[in-house]
Amino acid sequence: MPTLHTVNKSPFERNSLATCLERAAGGDGVLLCEDAVIGARKGSAFAKALAEKAATCAIYALAPDLAARGIKGEDVVEAVKTVDYSGFVDLAADADRVCAWL
Amino acid sequence: MSEKSRKKFLYLNRRAPYGSVYALESLEVVLIGAAFEQDVSLAFLDDGVYQLVEGQDTAGIGMKNFSKTYRALGDFEVRKLFVERESLEARGLKESDLMPIVWEDEDEDWAEKPSIAVVDKAAMAELIAASDVVLSF
């Protein structure tokens, strides 16, 4: 993958997820971690934007951060894949670069 | 304690738990306020509604799961938890996604009564306007 984008802040609190989604290129990956995972819940105001972006980019959410916030696997937007810490490491290692949207 | 020194405290919680330390800090200050026999209300809006979501499991992130503490608030005479409906809806959450939090009414043979009230944005504004002190987290 050319670029792995990471977002760690809630999309309801900052615009980093929206900024990232507008700039991630086709074939890139976008990984949501920490408070950013709450945007990946089904029915959230960001669910549609994530599902649309998933047509050209792989979207991931970090499973331990979902669990900490009480978000079960079935509550996650279907187009979003869940990964654990080692999956995160693999994505970062396989990417040409990692771009963090803080 | 005289009524004069008893104030209406409102704790305004607007952040999700674990991503920052605000939620945990708020809870600690709430318990301190309760020890001084103040009239305490808690408001949960924006990402703060996530503090009360049921089924939090922090084993994977190596942080203390403090969500169970909210269930103990009734024992500290903290019985008024207001959750904003609009904030829940924007996040795909329903009232049934929140953990059940109750207090025991000693005047009614310790009957368990719900502490959480889901209110709309206008009621939240009134709550703020009716408070003597607002502490924001």
Image (spheres, grey):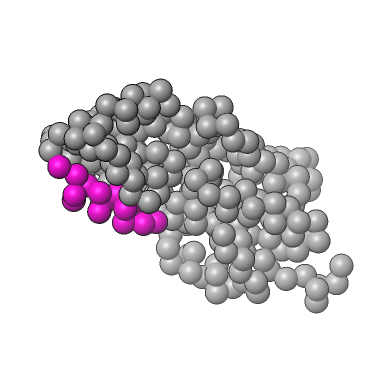
Q: Is A25 left, or right, of B77 in this rendering?
A: left
* Residue A54 in the image, given as x and y percentages of width and height: 18, 35
Q: Quadrant of the N terminus of chain A?
A: top left
Q: Is B11 left, or right, of A77 in this rendering?
A: right
Task: Find the residue positioned furthest to the right.
Answer: B1
**B17 part of magenta stretch:** no
Name which quarter of the figure residue A55 lies in.
top left
Q: Is residue B25 above or below residue B38?
A: above
Residue appearing at x 61%, y 69% in the figure: B134
Magenta-tinted stretch: A11-25
| Residue B25 visible in the displayed image | yes
Camera-nearest residue between B52 and A81: A81
Q: Is residue B59 above or below residue B135?
A: above
Residue appearing at x 80%, y 76% in the figure: B4
* Residue B21 in the image, given as x and y percentages of width and height: 58, 50
Residue appearing at x 81%, y 61% in the figure: B36
Q: Is B61 left, or right, of A37 in this rendering?
A: right
Q: Is A6 left, or right, of B103 in this rendering?
A: left
| Residue A29 visible in the displayed image | no
Task: Find the residue positioned furthest to the bottom.
Answer: B4
Name which quarter of the figure residue A4 lies in.
top left
Q: How many numbered circles are shown?
A: 0
**A20 part of magenta stretch:** yes
Residue appearing at x 45%, y 51% in the figure: B47
* Residue A59 in the image, given as x and y percentages of width and height: 25, 34
* Residue A90 in the image, given as x and y percentages of width and height: 33, 24
